[in-house]
Amino acid sequence: TAAEPALVIENLIAGYRGVPAIRGVNLRVDPGNILALLGPNGAGKTTTLLAAAGLLTPLSGTVTALGAPVSGRVERTARAGVSLIPDDRGLFHRLTVTENLRLAGGRDELDQALERFPQLRPLLRRRCGLLSGGEQQSLAIARTLMRKPRVLLIDELSMGLSPIAIQAILPTLRQLADETNLAIVLVEQHIDQALSIADSAVVLHHGSVALSGPAAALREDRQQIQRAYFGR
Ligand code: ATP
């Protein structure tokens, strides 16, 4: 029997002050899968994530998380297990790494987080604002995992990260999906790197889905993606 999808977005129209920024977006992620959400600046990637997290109320269409209708209901969405890491990562820069982690849970969760991200151990007493981009992103992911999400939405994963840090963090996400059945929606500017760990991809252009399919197929046809970026 097919597993229940982790996240389903159907015919979603959402935007700001009644003006649509995305129009008719459809996507689906299964547990343990990674979906790369791609597209040029202003295509509607962040808007899609905000709607998926329940932070934007759809003008129409639906968001379903683990079988529960959650459209526009931020608390219900969080309870269903959907967590968003925003592009600014939402960390408290004046607090230490430990303090940032403790805001998300107790000792047990913190220990589990450090097992998955051992690179944070020597940094625990460091102020978060003094960490590198890669360390901050690891902290943001570790902190979010302490809430035991079933769907993780990550906006602009690699913003402010060095190429080496990007290379280090992508396999961690793949492992998380494989080992914990977490579903991940990944907004990422580096198309090839995102496709290298993703199971599927959706390319947005001007608020609509220009292209979608299995990541393996899209890796084979880079030109198709190029055309989708230009809306052709
Ligand atoms: P980027 O990579 O630049 O973040 P994106 O694909 O995430 O791009 P969105 O941020 O979702 O795109 O923006 C989609 C459209 O919605 C854009 O035209 C943008 O100008 C508009 N928009 C985004 N945020 C707001 C807002 N708070 N108020 C009004 N319009 C907005």
Image: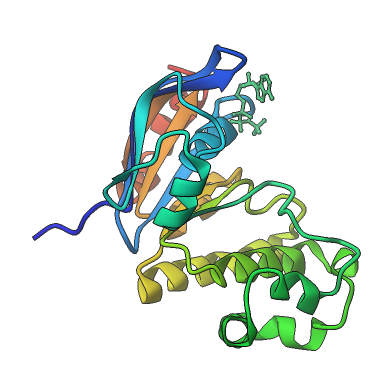
Can you tell which quarter of the image residue 120 is in?
bottom right
At 67% from the left and 63% from the top, the residue drawn is 140
> Can residue 168 be spotted in the picture?
no
Above/below status of 162 relative to 146: above
Quarter that holds the N terminus: bottom left
At 39% from the left and 74% from the top, the residue drawn is 180
Judged from this view, the residue extending furthest toward the top is 19
Q: Is residue 217 left or right of residue 99?
A: left
Residue 40: give x, y in percent of width and height.
Answer: 59, 29
Above/below status of 210 relative to 87: above
Above/below status of 164 relative to 52: below
Above/below status of 210 relative to 174: above
> Can residue 135 be spotted in the picture?
yes
**Chosen colour scheme:** rainbow
Task: Return the residue nearer the eye: 94 or 194.
Answer: 94
The mark tally for this picture is: 0
State which image quarter holds ligand 1: top right
Residue 175: give x, y in percent of width and height.
Answer: 45, 73
At 45% from the left and 47% from the top, the residue drawn is 77
At 86% from the left and 61% from the top, the residue drawn is 93
Residue 80: give x, y in percent of width and height.
Answer: 40, 54
Judged from this view, the residue extending furthest toward the left is 1
